[in-house]
Image (tube, rainbow, N blue to C red):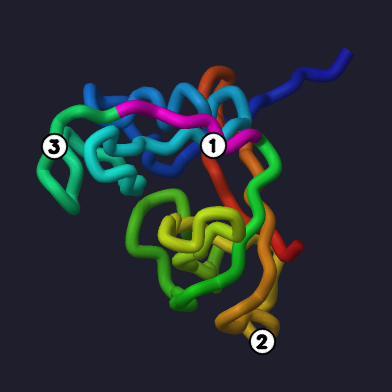
């Protein structure tokens, strides 16, 4: 029998905090969960301790499900790794994506399996979850 070697995930893993753990708990289950202000009904992404619009701390969390569509609102193509572990991902497309069903919400993520020649503002994308460890999944985007 041959020996199997498992290569670990080399990139930084986002930490769960008091303010963002429901977001990451949802991602780990391949589901988008967004923070929402109960006072003004605005969504907050990334989540925080209070509403960025009205300052209220009366916040809740809403599941958006596991089928999340959007379009590229803005992007940058990185040709050099800025953090350890990304050296084999270049060029890396980092996009701000406007959600289809909640256009006021923008989520930053990588657009995977896409050539820099094919990326453009308005490109339809779909959220996927990349299982990076046994108990952590990272939201990413692919062309829809």
How far apart are the alpha carbons under marks 3 and 2?
43 Å
Q: Nearer the viewer, residue 137 or 8?
A: 137
Badge 2 crowding class, 10 Å Cα cut-off, few under 14, some 14 to 19, many 20 or more, is few
**Residue toward you, 86 or 16:** 16
Quarter of the image for the C terminus: give it: bottom right
**Quarter assignment of residue 61:** top left
Labels 2 and 1: the sequence-earlier one: 1
**Residue visible at 19% across and 43% down in the picture:** 51
**Which residue was labeled with disc 3?**
56
Viewer-proximal residue among 37 and 78: 37
Q: Residues within 10 Å of mark 1 (few under 14, many from 20)?
A: many
Quarter the N terminus occupies: top right
Mostly what secondary structure, the magenta segment?
strand
**Residue 118 appears left or right of 61:** right
Q: Position of residue 104 (x, y in %)?
A: 42, 61
> Residue sitting at 45 percent across and 66 percent down?
96
Q: Which residue is mark 2?
A: 117
Query: Circle 1 sits on which residue?
Result: 32
Left-right relation of 63 to 58: right
Q: Residues within 10 Å of mark 3 (few under 14, many from 20)?
A: some
**Residue at the right extreme of this rendering:** 1
Which stretch did the figure color magenta? 60-65
Secondary structure under the numbered disc 1 in the rendered image:
strand
Q: Is residue 45 above or below residue 37?
A: below
| Alpha carbon distance from label 2 to label 1 | 29 Å
Marks 3 and 1, how far apart in space?
Answer: 22 Å
Name the image quarter holding residue 24.
top left
Q: Is residue 133 visible?
A: yes
Question: Residue at 43% of width from left, 43% of height from top?
Answer: 11
Q: How many marks?
A: 3
């Amino acid at each position: 029998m041959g020996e199997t070697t498992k290569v670990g995930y080399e990139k930084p893993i986002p930490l769960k905090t008091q303010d963002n753990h429901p977001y990451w708990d949802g991602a780990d289950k391949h589901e988008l969960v967004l923070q929402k202000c109960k006072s003004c009904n605005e969504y907050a992404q990334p989540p925080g301790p209070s509403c960025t619009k009205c300052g209220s701390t009366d916040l809740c969390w809403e599941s958006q499900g596991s089928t999340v569509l959007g379009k590229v609102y803005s992007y940058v193509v990185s040709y050099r790794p800025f953090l350890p572990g990304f050296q084999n991902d270049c060029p890396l497309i980092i996009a701000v994506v406007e959600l289809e069903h909640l256009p006021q919400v923008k989520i930053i993520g990588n657009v995977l399996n896409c050539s820099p020649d094919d990326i453009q503002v308005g490109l339809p994308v779909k959220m996927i979850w990349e299982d990076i460890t046994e108990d952590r999944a990272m939201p990413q985007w692919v062309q829809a």
